[in-house]
Amino acid sequence: HVQLVESGGGSVQVGGSLNLSCSASADALMYMAWFRQAPGQKREAVAAISTGGSSTMYVDSVKGRFTVSRESGKNTVHLQMNSLIPEDTGVYYCAAGIIIGRTNILLQNQYAYWGQGTQVTVS
């Protein structure tokens, strides 16, 4: 059973920065992604990264502000969030999965393993 552990959430002022981290216990390298869910809203994709780290995808609303990265050879990813705005508030979830072929790696149904989530509040 693959377990994911997230860290780094918290409260920050508008324009501030936070860095989220996530580690998955899987032996094999997996695609990893960040999703978020604001109060009363559906969970949405934020960013995703391939097993080797060479391919990344972002939702339009965070492009240029957020950067997803992973530690080489590990299922450990980071999400550097800069220029935060109130709309970034929500619970951020890390996800991991095995993805084969050319596909949109931001699709939630491709990720079988999920973390418990970490709260990010921007005010």
Image: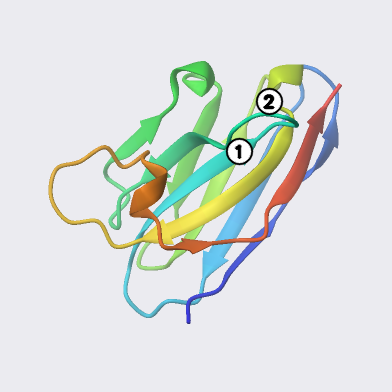
Residue 71 shows in this picture: no
Q: Quadrant of the C terminus?
A: top right
Residue for point 31% across, 42% down: 105
Ranked by sequence position, the earlier of labels 1 and 2 is 1
**Which amino acid type is shown beneath numbered disc 1?**
Arg
Disc 1 residue crowd, few under 14, some 14–19, many 20+, Cα 10 Å? many
* 117 versus 98 height, above or below: above
Residue for point 74% across, 29% down: 89
The one nearer the camera, 25 or 64, is 25
**Which amino acid type is shown beneath numbered disc 2?**
Asp
The one nearer the camera, 43 or 31, is 43
Element class at badge 2: helix
Of circles 1 and 2, the one toward us is 1
Determine whether label 1 and label 2 are within 8 Å by CB.
yes
User: Which residue matches tag 2?
Assistant: 88
User: Which residue matches tag 1?
Assistant: 36
Residue 60 picture location, percent across and down: 44, 18
Residue 23 picture location, percent across and down: 55, 66
Residue at mark 1 to residue at mark 2: CA–CA distance: 8 Å
Residue for point 55% across, 74% down: 3
Residue 80 sits in which quadrant?
top right
Residue 56 sits in which quadrant?
top left
Residue 69 picture location, percent across and down: 45, 46
